[in-house]
Amino acid sequence: PSKSPTAGPTPTPSKSPTAGPTPAITLAPAPASWVEIASNGFENGSGGCSWNDWTDGGADAKLITYSSNVRPGGNCALRIRDNTGTSRVTSRELDVDNKSTLRVTFWYRPRNMSGSENFHLDISKDGGDFVLVSTWSNMPSGYNEAIVEIPLAGVSNVKVRFENEGAGNKDRVYIDDITIEAM
């Protein structure tokens, strides 16, 4: 121990109580955060392609491995073309019980889509009919990110569907890296 004196007096505790009780601190609940409930880059983990719980719509929906149409960083992407009943893909049923909002984030690349040709995102809530949520037309070239938020009040399960409305087989949209979150 030091034998030299301290620079000043040592404070002593107060002998009298404080003026009143310490006020309680009320914390606001933490804001809800997004929870990932599904994602798909259409790879199978072994270098090949896989639907990974999405339903193949038929002849006009295909998994492709062409490097110019696959988003950088992956090996596979989804291609939907023209506007037949097979120009679509659908997610598995997703549990969204007690969630208020669904967010779908994905990347898309149009090819030969022009004028009124478009593709759209639809949703089915609790097994009901699919309803149009958002449409993309007059799209810029290259891969573009899209983020769509959908209210879910009172909904327990949803399915998400992408569908093309091109005029022919050469009117295509490539979709990759889909992430579906709920809050």
Image: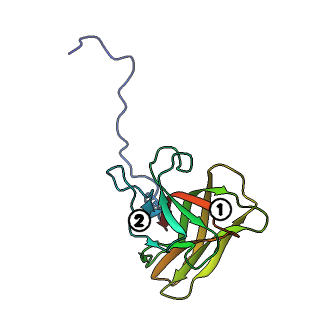
Label 1: few (<14), some (14–19) or many (≥20) C-alpha neighbours in 10 Å: few
User: Which residue is farthest left?
Assistant: 1
Q: Residue at x 52, y 74 (%)?
A: 160
Kindly indicate whether the residue at mark 2 contacts the one at mark 1 (C-beta within 8 angstroms): no
Q: Amino acid at mark 1?
A: Lys
> Residue 92: image x %, image y %?
42, 74
13 and 157: which one is in front? 157
Q: Helix or strand or loop: what does disc 2 sit on?
A: loop
Q: Which mark is residue 79?
A: none
> Mark 2 highlights which residue?
51
> Mark 1 highlights which residue?
170
Between tags 1 and 2, which lies in front? 1
> Residue 174: image x %, image y %?
57, 58
Q: Residue at x 64, y 70 (%)?
A: 82
From what the image shows, is residue 59 above or below residue 128? above
Q: Residue at x 48, y 74 (%)?
A: 99
* Quadrant of the frame with the N terminus: top left
Quarter of the image for residue 147 reads bottom right
> Residue 29: image x %, image y %?
47, 65
| Residue 100 is at least partly visible in this image | no
Q: Helix or strand or loop: what does disc 1 sit on?
A: loop
181 and 114: which one is in front? 114
Q: Amino acid at mark 2?
A: Trp
User: Which residue is farthest bottom?
Assistant: 128
Mark 1 vs mark 2, CA separation in Å: 22 Å
> Residue 2: image x %, image y %?
24, 13
104 and 173: which one is in front? 173
Q: Residue at x 52, y 88 (%)?
A: 128
